[in-house]
Image (spheres, rainbow, N blue to C red):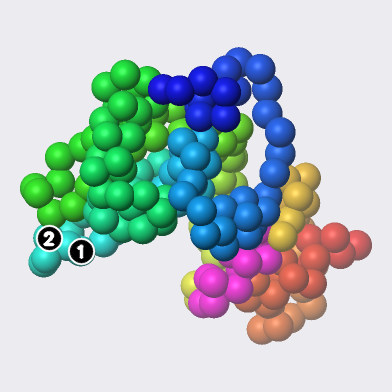
Amino acid sequence: MESNLEELPYQALIKGYILMPKQYFEDHLFNATEPMTKVEAFITLLIKVNYQETTCTLKGIRFTCHRGESLCSYQKWAEIFRWSKSKTARFFKELAEVEKVIELLPCQGLTTRLRIINYNQWTGCRYEARQREKEKADERFEEFWRLYHRITRMPKQNRGKAEREWRKMAPEQQELAINGIKKYYLGLKDIEYCKQAGTYLADKSYMNE
């Protein structure tokens, strides 16, 4: 690739990051009228690929488009970059074969499927760590949900409300909520008035004296 403004900033992977909102780039890149530079085109790739896994259908065939991937034709990318279709194809080929920052994946000839290599590093995102934290929180909720209904013998209702309340809570509060179920239930004067799990969390009944 050309040097100076046309050079892609690969050293960003080892020299740290500048935190900039996507909206800033969208306002400046997508509302312009001049063709993009290669740097701008690569930034646009980072903005446009999937942030999370989605499922789509092309000509009756279902595809899973993973995080860091895109299903978009050369013609559509050319319109976004304000380039010719041939220049766009050369750009992607160079990124894939020379710079090795993207992969062009098979898609049964339906469209262009590409994947940003090391997408999490390019975006400076602790995605895997957050996913593990979410999975751990989900496991803790399942533990709470089972234990609450085993102790109280309440019908398992309004799970959605309970999950929403659970997500609002800090890990320390979640631990208190789990450990406080038995104390709450045994402290009821009349078990007929035992709360549903979501209400127990919302009212912080695990804090009752």
Front one among 86 and 96: 86
Residue 178: image tag: none
Residue, far bottom: 192
Q: Residue at x 22, y 47 (%)?
A: 112
Q: Quadrant of the C terminus?
A: bottom right
| Closer to us: 1 or 189 | 1
Q: Is residue 175 above or below residue 39?
A: below
- Answer with left or right where residue 23 lies relative to residue 45: right
Q: Position of residue 187 (x, y in %)?
A: 79, 67
Q: Quadrant of the N terminus?
A: top left
Classify mark 1: residues with Cα within 10 Å, few (<14), some (14-19) or many (20+): few
Taking depth in this image into account, of 100 and 197 the one nearest to the observer is 100
Q: Is residue 132 above or below residue 17?
A: below
Q: Quadrant of residue 60?
A: bottom left
- Where disc 1 sits, the SS reads strand
**How far from the left and from the top, in percent, is residue 74?**
26, 50
Q: Amino acid at mark 1?
A: Thr
Return the x and y of residue 147 as percentages of the image width and height.
Answer: 57, 56
Residue type at the position of mark 2 = Ile
Residue ID for mark 1? 57
Secondary structure beneath dot 2 equals strand
Which residue in the structure is indicated by mark 2? Answer: 61
Q: Which residues are magenta?
A: 157-167
In magenta segment, residue 160:
yes
Asked if 161 appears above or below 39 in the picture, the reply is below
